[in-house]
Amino acid sequence: MIPARIIAFLAASILTMPAWCSATQLGAFDVKVLTSLTETYDDNVAYTSTSEKDDFITRARIGLSALYEAKTESLELRGNIIHHKYADYDNYDNTSEDLSVTAHKEFSAYDRAIFSDTFTHAEEPSSFEDEFGRTSGRYSYNRNRLNIAYSREFSKEFTLIARYLNDFDTYSRSDLSDSMQNRIGFEGDYMISSDTTVYGMYDFYHRDFDPGSSATINSFSAGGRQYLTDHTFADAGLGYDLIHSFNNKDYIKPHFSASLTDDFDETTRLSASYDKRYYTNASTQDLFDYWRASLAFNKRLLQRLGFNTSVFYGKGRYTTFDIKDTLKGAAAGLSYDVSDNVTAGLNYSYSKTTSNYASRAYERNTISVSITAAF
């Protein structure tokens, strides 16, 4: 009964656009409400290579955002609750939640700080990057990402940044250990010209599994950003990681990243990225040697009609377990602004993981239609 009531309530809120959904001022905060309904067909809801199960899933979401802005500071709060109702396999019914806090503060004309914290509870990966290297199967997870950074501008050209990040992940499966990663880093940015900026950085990572072992990485990097035109820029970085791995072995490994972004105009954006490195992920006590490439394109076709598409390809190998995974993914979507506050959407996504471990392989197609109201 509860899921049906939630769905009926959200449908009514979107179709009738009630007055309570209108943006309002709550003290110093600008508060907005978001509701949406999404109907999805998924041909592999269990993420398996055999005995695949397909189903229709209804997702009902209600979200809230609150924004405070002043001359030298801002604070934004965002939260969503999404109920997933499966037509046939109701044992997969679940509710996911996410909550984020972001704050900016300017202490002076030269000193700035940012604080952000994001919590997610869900049962499915939210992107191709999440799927890549992921332990297969269906399970729920809790994820928290904390980021604190302080920057000091010593001159018009030179800025120094200090940062601390904390990642915390827990899983519902008993065979997956919880993990925490702490990261401390320093970065120096130097602007050679209005078109060219270079940087050097050092980061220390420590990931610990409970129960389990730990690994550390001392990472040294250098790179920069170059504007090729007023609307096109390229980023590139390279360096070396000094790694003490979970198996008590030491490695020195290179890493490299590059990206290109082109904002052709106010309605069109193209971005491409590539990166390669050895890294620790949150669910497997082993080094992951990977490379991945992605491409994304967004275009406003008409005043009310938008189009987006993306592709992803990644290959990786866990060094000790000798698990080799390859992920191919593609997605495309259309959005139509029914009114200033209501948007309809149609989206398709495809992903395929191949592996030398058959239990990790699967192929999945999803197609979704949605309607969203934000006030």
Image (tube, grey):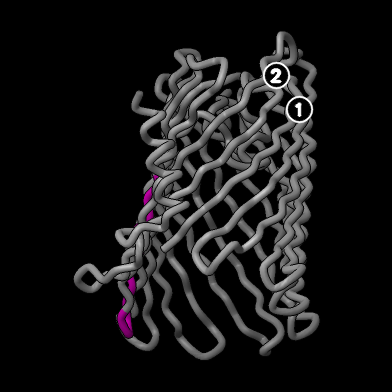
Q: Give the residue type at disc 2.
A: Arg
Q: Give the residue type at disc 1.
A: Thr
Query: What x and y, as percent, mark residue 79?
Result: 37, 50
Q: Separation of disc 1 and disc 2 at Cα? A: 7 Å
The answer to whether residue 283 is seen in the rendering is yes
Q: In the rendered image, which quarter contains the N terminus?
A: top left
Asked if the residue under mark 2 is in contact with the one under mark 1, i.e. CB atoms within 8 Å, the reply is: yes
Q: Name the residue located 37 percent from the left edge and 48 percent from the top edge.
A: 99
Q: Earlier in the sequence, mark 1 or mark 2?
A: 1
Q: Which residue is identified by label 2?
A: 360
Quick check: 232 above or below 345? below
Q: Name the residue located 59 percent from the left edge and 46 percent from the top edge.
A: 370
Q: Nearer the viewer, residue 244 or 134?
A: 134
Q: Name the residue located 66 percent from the left edge and 65 percent from the top edge.
A: 222
Q: Does residue 78 show up magenta in the picture?
A: yes
Query: What x and y, as percent, mark residue 133?
Result: 66, 31
Q: Which residues are magenta?
A: 70-80
User: Magenta stretch: dominant SS?
Assistant: strand
Horizontally, residue 358 falls left or right of residue 17, namely right
| Secondary element at image label 1 | strand
Q: In the rendered image, which quarter contains the C terminus?
A: bottom left
Query: What x and y, as percent, mark residue 226?
Result: 74, 77
Query: What x and y, as percent, mark residue 200?
Result: 60, 68
Residue reaching furthest to the top: 51
Q: Nearer the viewer, residue 233 or 56?
A: 56
> Which label sits on residue 353?
1
